[in-house]
Image (cartoon, rainbow, N blue to C red):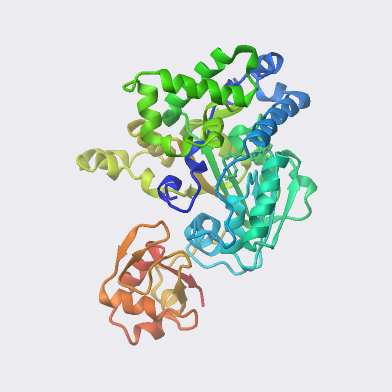
Amino acid sequence: MVKFEKQPFVNAKCKIYTTNQFNSTSCKQVVKLLSCEQQIFDKLRLPQDLLTMSDSQTVSAAVAKLYNTYPFPPEALLDEPPPGYNWRWNWLAAHNFCTGQKPQRQDIRILDAGCGTGVGTEYLVHLNPQASVVGIDLSTGALAVAKERCQRSGANRVEFHHLSLFDVEQLPGEFDLINCVGVLHHTPDPIRGIQALAKKLAPGGLMHIFVYGELGRWEIQLMQKAIALIQGDKKGDYRDGVQVGRQIFASLPENNRIVKYDKQRWSLENNKDEYFADMYVHPQEIDYNTETLFELIDASGLEFIGFSNPSFWDLERLLGKAPELVERAKELSDRQLYRLIELLDPEVTHYEFFLGRPPLIKADWSDDNALLAAIPELNPCIEGFPSQCFFNYDYQIVNLSVAEFEFMQRCDANSTVVEILAGVELGLDEVRKLLQQQLILLTPA
Ligand SMILES: C[S@@+](CC[C@H](N)C(=O)[O-])C[C@H]1O[C@@H](n2cnc3c(N)ncnc32)[C@H](O)[C@@H]1O
């Protein structure tokens, strides 16, 4: 991902998410709700804890109806495993990113909460050959596609359940990896949702979440409101919404700001009605900024490990020409720094990040002896190796020196660092650099 959107093998879902908002004074989340039911619309303006179960059920029913009409994402079904990788769905790569070392076990349990048509689920199965995977979703239409997708590509270590993530306690046991991409922001109560999921995360487990950002979705919100106004009583008729939306786009002048933004960011995917509907006629959407995001994260009771698109959260990228400002910003807390970055780069359309349930043992490879005794292996998420020039976990091009290349070639998951270094002229700091670049994984002695 790191920007999901830059990666060829990840459906564009991750960049897409949609819609309206409601306002909750208790959690300060700004949410706008498409009022397919005016009553619910009014109630959703109340604090979260005043939402009744039936409000919640009505919203969920509206969401299920959308995805039964337009199962998402509408990616083609293949008769073979999907191409490439998304490292966030590979347990070895994700664990290494989060803890700096290879996990002890690979026979793990994975939950894909809100799996949709199973694009991510299918990757989770194929990228983790020892794992068993469970996919849950509200939409029977999306689940039917997910089942067929996995069956056709031979992803058979998976079971699907028609289940809301609010009822996830009904599943037996705990999960080592929970993936919840593009879902929480479409629920009536993301805090209750993330808490329900957190209860199912095993100690030492990781959760990968993706939710919408409000700053980069401003034009989308305007169009959502415009469509809803024209639809009037027909709100909740998603086919009508798509038709109205398409007519508006076709009629607006080419230099209109909303048109320009849609063309620049989304037009490729939005050719498909499923994407268009997901973006512009969704019955429920809550968009975040970093401040409200951390309210959600804190409520989960889990540890925030980090954003899974770290290159975005680099101030140097924005203020590199003013090193004195970068220096001054070092006084800021992490959260203040994130806020500063999004204020300066309001393109942010989503937040993607890992949470973890302690105890999460993070490796510290600063000790030379520990590093020398460790066993390195290649990150499974690289493409084009063996070559000095290849793609890293994030599909960025890497150029290795001759010595780095030789070192990596000898990483056979058996030899220790000291054994490999006996035949390669490479310093320990250069080995650490390979680690920082996520090119190798280490198993401690
Ligand atoms: C935008 S799609 C994302 C699908 C998939 N995670 C992906 O990224 O490709 C959102 C999915 O979340 C599901 N969903 C929404 N609320 C849910 C809930 N409370 N429990 C389970 N699934 C839910 C919807 O039915 C829909 O299939």
Q: Is residue 381 above or below residue 13?
A: below
Residue at the spot 40% in from the left edge and 85% down from the top edge: 419
Q: Where residue 82 appears, x then y in whole percent?
A: 54, 59
Q: Where residue 396 appears, x then y in whole percent?
A: 35, 57
Side of 71 relative to 1 (left or right): right
Residue at the spot 59% in from the left edge and 61% down from the top edge: 79
Q: Is residue 413 above or below residue 110?
A: below
Residue at the spot 37% in from the left edge and 48% down from the top edge: 311
Side of 239 relative to 144 (left or right): left
Residue toward you, 47 or 128: 128
Q: Quadrant of ligand 1?
A: top right
* Residue 140 seen in the figure: yes
Q: Is residue 359 above or below residue 445?
A: above
Q: Where residue 442 appears, x then y in whole percent?
A: 47, 71
Residue at the spot 62% in from the left edge and 41% down from the top edge: 300
Q: Where residue 336 appears, x then y in whole percent?
A: 40, 36
Residue toward you, 73 or 305: 73
- The picture quadrant where one finds residue 371 is bottom left
Q: How many labels, in total?
A: 0
Side of 410 relative to 33 (left or right): left
Residue toward you, 356 or 142: 142
* Residue 359 seen in the figure: no
Side of 79 relative to 372 (left or right): right
- The picture quadrant where one finds residue 429 is bottom left
